[in-house]
Image: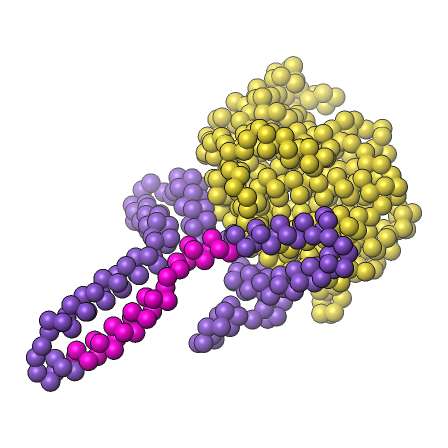
């Protein structure tokens, strides 16, 4: 790569990247903030008391009443954010005095995926009452109270996989027994349909911008976003990534209608209650945007998130239902048509994004000691080769 | 290739220092001692890895000079004569190896990085101002090269378990042309 010191980026270089890769304002703000702080210290372990004090300060600033925080403890899980569970004794508006289990979700010094806590907060808030989401309470979008930006949400009941089952890191490799599949699959389609048909204009989504319909603006914003991250973070060039960027720009699909996109809609990112197999909360909204429905469809049908059924032949999307059945049910539930060429394009786009996160950002932050789990980030880099091969094949076989 | 041993060792040491060590029972003296030894050895490995090749080459050059000196000064009966003949053979072989080892692993790594950058830059340029026939040819060449390289990259980390069909990926030893691949 060129002789630019990416660990100490100059203001001129940051400004040049911002100009070269126009994207949504909030995305630009978050990425610019990342680069302006890059030369700062790495992540150092912090005592729980620091997080408790910061959380109390955040709650005091946004909730006037008396409250008491207790039972704080670290939570594991997820590759990108720190999480602390606690109980808040408070006068909950509309409910009265109660002890509410909550979770603080805070960024490390730099995250494998640098996103906006404000966008995550607004999106979850917007979907309360539409699809199951954890209650979200407060947001420290600038890290004024806590060491880094954070949000506080309620503890949602449920599991990501049956208690008796097992899966790999980040929930990949989960196999659901057929009886769970039969009950969860219709809800899985129904929730996606509700997200895609949600009237986002009635919600407070001020941190989002709406790409122009009947244009390629949505696709272009996306390619700009991840190419900017590649430029900011990559240590070693990958010619295939340059080809992929060019291919993506050459074949950008026209978006017919803007919808809310979850952007990480898959098995492992929802909780369900085991006794009745009901989906109780959709998680991980941090990459959500207003954009093209085909982004979610491409992501959800990724081979890595599914597996073969017991017959050894039928491939199950997200381990839940055959792909054709899933897409057919989606079309019926939404009234939207699926453009297979757009799905193909977004599959390349999703691999491009993931390869950027793993090889560019993953390397940069693990080498800089910027997270609470550099060892996990380093481990995850290994999957990048498989994703690159998938992306290469998709480009080669493009319709 | 970003997932090199230096990054892996650095991440493991940080995890052990920040997370694992504070959680080890202070009363378990054996565990306390051994985790510190593990971290110490990993730190030593991190320091030695980039120097290992130079260290070995330098030792070989010293042994070669020593061998030349021994051949000049040593004399004796049949046994010494046979030993001198064997030493002469092995020294010639060692010198030939040393001659071939003019480029270090670091030199190779830097050359790889340099060519990755230059080829990547060319691909971007062609798609900005080349005609579509050239772009198609560059696309085919890039996909073909990447296919071969990615096969090796995937084989390199096969034990991590990411491959949906691991049997489709040949052993890395075979791909690197190492004779005794199993």
Name the residue: 49% across, 55% down.
B111
Residue A182, percent from left and from top: 78, 56
* Quarter of the view holding residue B88: bottom left
Please give the range of residues in magenta: B83-112
Q: Is A98 rendered above or below residue B102?
A: above
Name the magenta segment's main secondary structure. helix
Q: Name the colour assigned to chain B in the rendering.
A: purple
- The number of numbered discs placed on residues in the rendered structure image is 0
Q: Residue furthest left?
A: B76
* Quarter of the view holding residue A14: top right
Name the residue: 45% across, 46% down.
B11
* Quarter of the view holding residue B90: bottom left
Q: Is A182 rendered above or below residue A26?
A: below
Q: Nearer the viewer, residue A209 or A117?
A: A209
Residue A118, percent from left and from top: 68, 29
Name the residue: 30% across, 57% down.
B55
Q: Nearer the viewer, residue A148 or A46?
A: A148
Q: Is A53 rendered above or below residue B25?
A: above
Name the residue: 80% across, 39% down.
A217
Left or right of A382, for residue B89: left
Left or right of A351, for residue A200: right
Evaluate whether residue A55 shows in this view.
no
Residue B94, percent from left and from top: 29, 70
Residue A332, percent from left and from top: 90, 51
Q: Name the colour assigned to chain A in the rendering.
A: yellow
Query: Does the magenta run of residues contain B10?
Result: no
């Amino acid at each position: 790569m060129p002789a630019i010191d990416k660990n100490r980026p100059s203001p001129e270089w940051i400004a040049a990247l911002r100009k070269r890769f126009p994207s949504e304002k909030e995305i630009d703000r978050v990425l610019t903030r990342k680069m302006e702080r890059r030369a700062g210290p790495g992540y150092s372990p912090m005592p729980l008391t620091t997080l408790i004090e910061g959380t109390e300060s955040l709650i005091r600033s946004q909730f006037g009443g008396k409250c008491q925080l207790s039972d704080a403890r670290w939570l594991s899980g997820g590759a990108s954010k720190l999480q602390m569970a606690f109980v808040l004794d408070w006068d909950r508006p509309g409910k009265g005095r109660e002890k509410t289990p909550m979770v603080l979700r805070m960024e490390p010094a730099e995250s494998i995926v640098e996103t906006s806590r404000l966008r995550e907060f607004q999106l979850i808030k917007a979907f309360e009452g539409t699809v199951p989401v954890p209650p979200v309470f407060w947001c420290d979008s600038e890290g004024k109270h806590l060491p880094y930006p954070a949000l506080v949400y309620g503890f949602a009941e449920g599991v990501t996989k049956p208690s008796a089952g097992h899966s790999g890191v980040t929930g990949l490799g989960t196999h659901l027994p057929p009886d769970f599949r039969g009950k969860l699959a219709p809800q899985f389609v129904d929730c996606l349909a509700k997200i895609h048909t949600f009237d986002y204009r009635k919600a407070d989504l001020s941190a989002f911008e709406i790409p122009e319909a009947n244009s390629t603006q949505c696709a272009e914003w996306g390619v700009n976003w991840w190419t900017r991250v590649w430029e900011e973070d990559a240590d070693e060039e990958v010619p295939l990534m340059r080809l992929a960027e060019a291919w993506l720009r050459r074949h950008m699909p026209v978006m017919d209608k803007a919808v809310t996109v979850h952007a990480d809609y898959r098995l492992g990112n929802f909780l369900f209650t085991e006794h009745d197999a009901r989906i109780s909360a959709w998680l991980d909204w941090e990459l959500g945007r207003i954009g093209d429905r085909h982004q979610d469809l491409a992501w959800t049908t990724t081979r890595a998130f599914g597996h073969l059924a017991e017959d050894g032949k039928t491939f199950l999307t997200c381990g839940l239902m055959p792909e054709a059945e899933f897409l057919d049910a989606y079309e019926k539930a939404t009234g939207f048509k699926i453009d297979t060429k757009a799905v193909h394009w977004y599959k390349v786009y999703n691999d491009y994004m993931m390869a950027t996160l793993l090889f560019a950002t993953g390397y940069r932050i693990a080498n800089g000691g910027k997270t609470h789990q550099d060892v996990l980030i380093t481990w995850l880099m290994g999957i990048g080769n498989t994703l690159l091969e998938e992306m290469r094949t998709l480009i080669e076989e493009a319709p | 290739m970003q997932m090199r041993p230096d990054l892996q060792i650095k991440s493991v040491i940080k995890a052990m220092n920040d997370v694992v060590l504070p959680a080890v029972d202070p009363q378990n003296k054996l565990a306390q001692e051994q985790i510190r030894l593990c971290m110490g050895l990993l730190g030593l490995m991190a320091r030695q890895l980039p120097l290992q090749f130079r260290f070995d080459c330098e030792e070989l050059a010293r042994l070669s000079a020593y061998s030349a000196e021994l051949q000049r000064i040593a004399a004796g009966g049949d046994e010494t004569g046979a030993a001198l003949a064997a030493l002469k053979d092995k020294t010639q072989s060692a010198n030939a190896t040393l001659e071939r080892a003019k480029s270090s692993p670091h030199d190779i790594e830097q050359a790889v990085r340099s060519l990755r950058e230059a080829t990547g830059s060319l691909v971007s340029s062609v798609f900005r101002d080349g005609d579509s026939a050239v772009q198609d040819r560059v696309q085919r060449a890039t996909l073909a090269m990447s296919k071969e390289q990615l096969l090796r990259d995937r084989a390199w980390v096969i034990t991590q378990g990411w491959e949906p069909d691991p049997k489709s990926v040949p052993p890395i030893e075979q791909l690197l042309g190492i004779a005794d691949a199993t």
